[in-house]
Amino acid sequence: MDENLKAIELLMQNAYDYGKTGFEIAKLKSVEKISDIASSLIPHTVVFLLIASFLFFLNLGLALWLGDILGKTFYGFIIVGGFYGICGFVLHFFMNKWFKRVVGDYFVKMLLN
């Protein structure tokens, strides 16, 4: 009877250790995924900011140039703003589901790899 109790106690201790180890492995894997995502987002953010500033100054120059051609500076800004308004309209009403799917797939792929 004593042997059975010791065997059960040893089995319970092994099960506890196994569960604790499994939890530690899951915790380490989640930390690895979070650090992997964060480390990939930082360079992407820097590149995004550089491209955004480039596009900002390009659009500013284009608006000023168009305004100079048309005789009034604000005409250039109206044309550039209208262009982006049309692009936003098309993206929102015609490509919204596609854009959501692409972004969602990207994040799922990042989390599962």
Image (tube, helix red, strand yellow):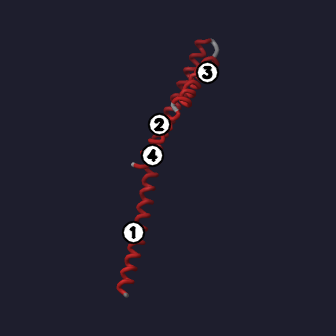
Residue type highlighted by circle 2: Val
Discs 1, 4 touching: Cβ within 8 Å:
no
Say few, some or many: other residues with alpha carbon within 10 Å of mark 3 (under 14 / 14 to 19 / 20 or more). many
For marks 2 and 1, give the CA distance.
44 Å
The first of marks 3 and 2 along the sequence is: 2
Q: Quadrant of residue 5?
A: bottom left
Residue shown at 64%/14% (left/top)? 72
Between 1 and 33, the residue placed more toward the observer is: 1
Check disc 3 and report the residue beneath it: 77
Relative side of 43 to 78, left or right: left
Mark 2 vs mark 1: in front: 1
Task: Locate residue 20 relative to residue 71 in the image: left or right.
Answer: left
Find residue 88 and name its label.
Answer: none
Q: Which of disc 4 and disc 1 is earlier in sequence?
A: 1
Label 2 environment density (alpha carbons within 10 Å; few <14, some 14–19, many ≥20): few
Task: Point out which mark residue 108 bears.
Answer: 4
Most foreground residue, 92 or 65 = 92
Q: Name the residue under label 1.
A: 18
Q: What element carries label 3?
A: helix
20 over 69 or under it: above or below = below
- Residue labelled with disc 2: 47
Q: Please, what secondary structure does the residue beneath circle 1 have?
A: helix
Which badge, 1 or 3, comes first in the chain's sequence?
1
Amino acid type, label 3: Phe
Q: As rendered, which of 17 and 38 lies closer to the eye?
A: 17
Q: Position of residue 39 (x, y in %)?
A: 45, 47
User: Quick check: 26 above or below 100?
Assistant: below
Frontmost of labels 3 and 4 is 4
Say which residue appears at 57% left-offset and 16% top-offset.
66
Q: Residue furthest bottom?
A: 1
